[in-house]
Image (cartoon, helix red, strand yellow):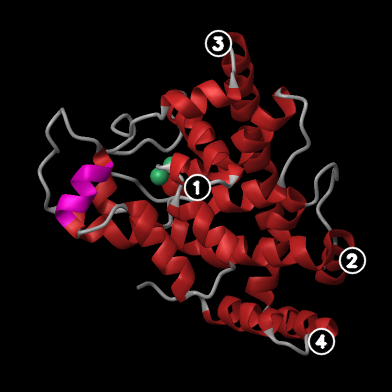
Amino acid sequence: MPALPTAAARTLQMLRHARLEVPRVLRFMESESEWAHQVLALAGLFAWGRVRSPENLAEAFAHLGFKRFHQLISVAAVAPILREPVQGYGLAQGELWDHSLAVAIATREILLEKGLRPCLEAFTAACLHDVGKVVLGSALESEPEPAEDISFEEAELGAAGMDHSEAGALLLEHWRMPPWLVMAVRSHHAPLGCSFLIPDLIHLADAICLSVGVGGGRDGFRHRICPTVAERWNVSRGSLERIASRTVDTFEEVKRSMIDGERR
Ligand SMILES: [Fe+2]
Ligand SMILES: [Fe+2]
């Protein structure tokens, strides 16, 4: 099981504490300048409708409130792990993180296309949806290409005894992430077994991102799309094309602003 960076793990632990003292948490984070910088670089993404990123952590907390700030910290904590190359899936440095970000953006674009409000929980879960690949990567490294008639999840099951959704859920449980996040990640390739809409949305967003080639890797076109999900969301070909094109545009814009933020 990969470990979270120390400062990130400590922040999450402080946020879980029954007697939460926000100023203390923020002071601790500010004392870990690299960690504070990583959080601020992502903060603008979690503050919908906000053109610029917050200047400092206190401003980020004041603007986001506890729940959204906690989600920002959860994603920022795992982001360095998602940026690493994942050998068994043929994902180079940064590709899994790019895919995760693009799927998160696509969940927002699907909701907007349907006239619904963006859902930050879906965005957060989408940022972490494929984290299980980090765990299964080494088990799949020596595996030959799976036969044409089996899905990649079945190949993962054969090689590692579980698929990457389950591995991701176990990893998030190990890091003591909230149960709704664990459930969303666990169900993102089998959304019908779950009454919760977030896995559904991630499933569709994932298919859209893979269709435009963001972060496909070795398994990119080997996951089966659930027809019931496509039917349930009733998105026309025209809608899908608009969602895909806006996802790519927003993804590029986000990447540019994150690079600028990291340089600051
Ligand atoms: Fe996945
Ligand atoms: Fe994915």
Alpha carbon distance from label 2 to label 3: 41 Å
Q: Could you tell which of marks 2 and 3 lies nearer the N-terminus?
A: 2
Badge 1 crowding class, 10 Å Cα cut-off, few under 14, some 14 to 19, many 20 or more, is some
Q: Is residue 51 visible?
A: yes
Q: Which residue is mark 3?
A: 237
Q: Quadrant of the N terminus?
A: bottom left
Which type of secondary structure does the marked residue at label 4 adopt? loop
Residue position marked by numbered label 1 in the rendering: 194
Q: Earlier in the sequence, mark 2 or mark 4?
A: 4
The answer to whether residue 38 is above or below residue 105 is below
- Quadrant in which residue 51 is drawn: top right
Question: In what quadrant of the picture does the C terminus appear?
Answer: bottom right
Q: Label 3 vs label 1: CA separation?
A: 26 Å
Element marked by disc 2? helix
Distance in Å between CA atoms under marks 3 and 4: 49 Å
Segment colored magenta: 153-159
Q: Nearer the viewer, mark 4 or mark 1?
A: 1
Q: Which residue is mark 2?
A: 62
CB contact under 8 Å: marks 3 and 4: no
Q: Write down which quadrant ligand 1 falls in.
A: top left
Q: Nearer the viewer, mark 3 or mark 4?
A: 3
Rendered image: mark on residue 21? 4
Q: Is label 3 in contact with label 1 (beta carbons under 8 Å)? A: no
